[in-house]
Image: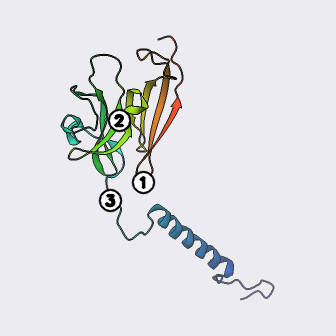
Amino acid sequence: MEDPSQPELQAHARPGFRHWALVAAACAAVIAAALAASPAAGRTTPTGTTPRALPTAAAPDPAKAQLPLDCGPFPVTVALSFSALLDGLPSTVVAAHCAAPNGTPSDAVFLLTPGPTVRATLLGEADGLTVTALKLRSDGTVTGRAKGYSSDDVPRFAPDLLLDLTWSHNGTGWDLTKSKAPAVTGV
């Protein structure tokens, strides 16, 4: 028997405006996140383009490349290099200089792609730097360290500057940032 003093309970409440507004907002958030993660540009994103180190045998051999250095009668010496997958291509970043018998020759840094072909000159000889380290960061940025000179009065056998070098890919080329490296003490 029903008790007239008790209100009637509804089995299910009808969704109201607030419910549907929350559902619409959640759907819009999911779609926006999907578009931000992979924008529709009419092309597919190639797989395997994450910058990463490669075995030397899987990348261009710098010994087989024609590096654009004017060394005259002297051979080209590769000082440093590393292999990586950059922009989806097997690549080698190489620091090289002319093997002159006296003085400290300046290095140039090149990006090699299959062929091997020089795809980009990252640092020219005219910068007057001797590159002492080259590395690849996980975000695809190339970093290095170099010795240089604060003026023409500094003897070429005694570099007085230590620089950190950073090359960031801008979509069409590479931007170089130079900053003074902290002095190493006790060495």
Q: Which residue position is annotated with label 3?
A: 46
Instruction: Give the number of the disc on residue 109.
Output: 2
Left or right: 21 as drawn, with respect to 34: right
- Mark 3 vs mark 2, CA separation in Å: 27 Å
Q: Amino acid at mark 2?
A: Val
Q: Is residue 170 above or below residue 37?
A: above
Instruction: Give the number of the disc on residue 117.
Output: none
Q: Amino acid at mark 1?
A: Gly
Identify the secondary structure beneath mark 3: loop
- Mark 1 vs mark 3, CA separation in Å: 15 Å
Tell me the quarter of the image containing the N terminus: bottom right
Of 5 and 93, the residue lying toward us: 93
Q: Earlier in the sequence, mark 3 or mark 2?
A: 3
Q: Residues within 10 Å of mark 1 (few under 14, many from 20)?
A: few
- Mark 1 vs mark 2, CA separation in Å: 19 Å
Of badges 1 and 2, the one in the foreground is 2
Q: Seen from this angle, which residue lies furthest top?
A: 186
